[in-house]
Image (cartoon, rainbow, N blue to C red):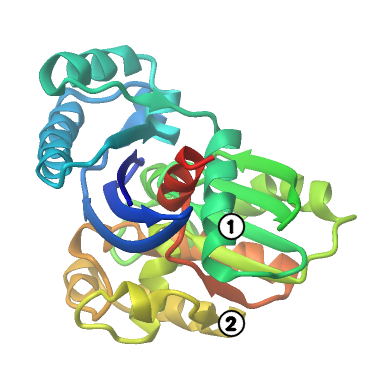
Amino acid sequence: MKKLGAIDIGTNSMRILIAKVKENKMIESFKDLRSTRIGEGVDKTGVLSQNSIQRNIDALKEFVEIAQREKVEKLSIIATSAVRDAKNKEDFLIRAYEEVGVHIEVISGEREAKLGFLGVLKGIGQIKNILVLDIGGGSTEFILGNEKGIHHVISINIGAVRMTEKFVTTDPVSKAEMDRMSEEIDHKIKIAMDDMKDFSIDCIVGIGGTITTLAAVWKKLKIYDRNQVHNTKLQHNQIKEMIDIFLSKNIEERIKMEGVHPKRADIITAGTLILERILSKIHKDVIVSEYDNLEGLIFEELH
């Protein structure tokens, strides 16, 4: 039996997965996250702020210590959209190496998508043609494929943090801001929709913090439970209903909602709108997966 670890430094949060693996199967796993928002201001300034770098170095130290305490044989660390886009990414990578002693791999949107797809496949079993939607803080990935492999990958620079910073100045979000955000999202996802029009899609699977939060909100989970979230089915009209609920509450009220992580309350409306606009074009329900690019990293290590 092996014990492997994976850390994902996303735009909004840093997550860790520690898994016991036997005969290429995950038999036990532990996941945790910190809302570190490394992508704060990146869309506007093009750089990682010193505060966001420090928050992420602190969280990385904590997670690496957990991995060492758990006697993880191999720890893989990736960074995605915000670090990928930042002009000063080297400042963060050098500090991580010098202060924490780890090497971080900054991955492309395409590789991020492939890891997410691999994780999803291991978590949902056999389905014909699936579209995996990964709505992150800085980008959204569309991954089309099946158990034979990936047919098509599209990565678009729309995410819950990016859209919030770009459009939202009121709390709750105003109708005018929602309309402008919808217009931008529709414009950006049109490229993906045009690219996918010749593919048959049997099922949509959603990964990432926005989608898992929506499952927790719909189920009114007081305490987040991965097992209850995994494989939840959400319909388009339920997503629209949740947008209306978020728009009826200010940030303090959203923080108190069952299922909403306090550090996600400011970006959940924008993230949900991205999902709603995509579903409005595809007309299918979305199945929520707790298996994502972290599991993908673990399974990649096994091959």
Question: Is residue 232 among the parts visible in the rendering?
Answer: yes
Residue depth check, mark 1 versus mark 2: number of the one nearer the observer: 1
Mark 1 lies on a secondary structure that is: strand
The residue shown at (45%, 61%) is 291
Q: Residues under labels 1 and 2: Cα distance?
A: 15 Å
| Position of residue 73 in the picture relative to residue 152 (left or right) | left
Q: Please name the amino acid that badge 2 sits on.
A: Gln
| Position of residue 75 in the picture relative to residue 159 (left or right) | left
Q: Earlier in the sequence, mark 1 or mark 2?
A: 1
The residue shown at (19%, 34%) is 56
Residue 249 in the image: x percent, y percent? 28, 76
The residue carrying mark 1 is 133
The residue shown at (62%, 58%) is 132
State the residue lying farthest toward the right.
198
Q: Please name the amino acid that badge 1 sits on.
A: Leu
Residue 271 in the image: x percent, y percent? 44, 59
- Compared to residue 302, the image places residue 196 above or below, namely below
Residue 150 in the image: x percent, y percent? 72, 47
Decide which of 212, 43 is in the foreground and name it. Answer: 212
Residue 235 is tagged as 2
Residue 117 is tagged as none
The quarter holding residue 128 reads: bottom right
Mark 2 lies on a secondary structure that is: loop
- Compared to residue 113, the image places residue 201 above or below, namely below
